[in-house]
Amino acid sequence: MSKSLSKRPPKTAPKSSALGAPVQQDPNEAPSIAKPLTRVVAILYDGMLILALLFLVGTVLTVIGTLLTMETGTESSQAQSLPTWYQNLVMTPAFVLTLVAFYGIFWRRGGQTLGMQTWRLKTVNNAGHLLTWGQSFKRILAACLMPLLFGVIGSLIGGSRTIMLTSAFLGLIFNYVFCLFNRRGLAVQDMLSNSITLKMPKVAHEGLWRGFKNRKKNQ
């Protein structure tokens, strides 16, 4: 983390609330590195929305793939599976792009997804600025590295799809267990992408939609 994030902010005049009443802010309170459990809970919040988006994308692509690549029948016995090339070259990249777009849009606009906003988390680069598209993509790849590695190992050891998915999930958990052994409390993706997830003070917490609005004004 750069010096700009490690230093405590200077004392400022009390901020005003929406009703005009002054809001007192503790001058000693500053953003801190988010705890691993809080990060995981925020991911679970976002996971429900991500699954809904992936289901929608998958449904649309399945319908398109069925119309373009297969003969449709009228009975269940005539049901077929989509070609392997379509699943690997069309559906899988579409799922990856959906994930990148979800996090990239939120991180670039306000540094927060919906789940992160609930727990006052914010992802920025080491200079304290919002991530660019390139930095967002790099962070997502870094977060997927350990699940992918664990999944490959599980596949080689067990061979079944269940073992592979379980191993990949353990790789995801490892990203955050690593925080407990890192001196600064950084996750694997923090170190590999030169970015960081912070726990924001209540007063300094901007909020998702206000962050979107302010980001638009500054462009």
Image (cartoon, rainbow, N blue to C red):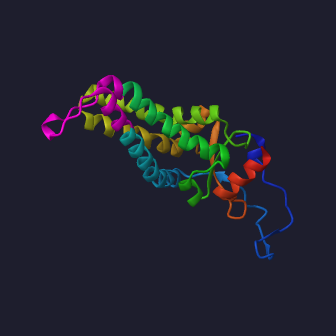
**Image position, residue 204 (x, y; %):** 72, 60
**Foreground of the two, 67 or 31:** 67
Q: Is residue 119 among what the camera can see?
A: no
Q: Is residue 79 magenta?
A: yes
| x 44%, y 46%: residue | 53
The stretch in magenta equals: 61-87
Specify the quadrant that holds the N terminus: top right
Query: Residue 32 location, x and y as percent?
Result: 66, 52
Single out the residue that lies furthest toward the right: 13
Residue at horizontal 73 percent and vertical 48 percent from the top: 215
Q: Quadrant of the C terminus?
A: top right
- Considering only vertical position in the picture, is 79 above or below 45? above
Total labels drawn = 0
Task: Tell me residue 143's x, y (percent).
Answer: 51, 36
Q: Quadrant of residue 116?
A: bottom right
Residue 27 coordinates in the image, percent (x, y): 79, 63
Q: Is residue 119 above or below residue 151?
A: below
Q: Is residue 60 magenta?
A: no
Q: Is residue 37 visible?
A: yes
- Identify the residue at the far left of this view: 77
Return the residue nearer the eye: 16 or 216. 216
Indicate left or right for 124 with 88 as reference.
right
Whether residue 208 sits left or right of residue 11 in the image: it is left
Q: Quadrant of residue 90?
A: top left
Residue sitting nearer the eye, 209 or 145: 209
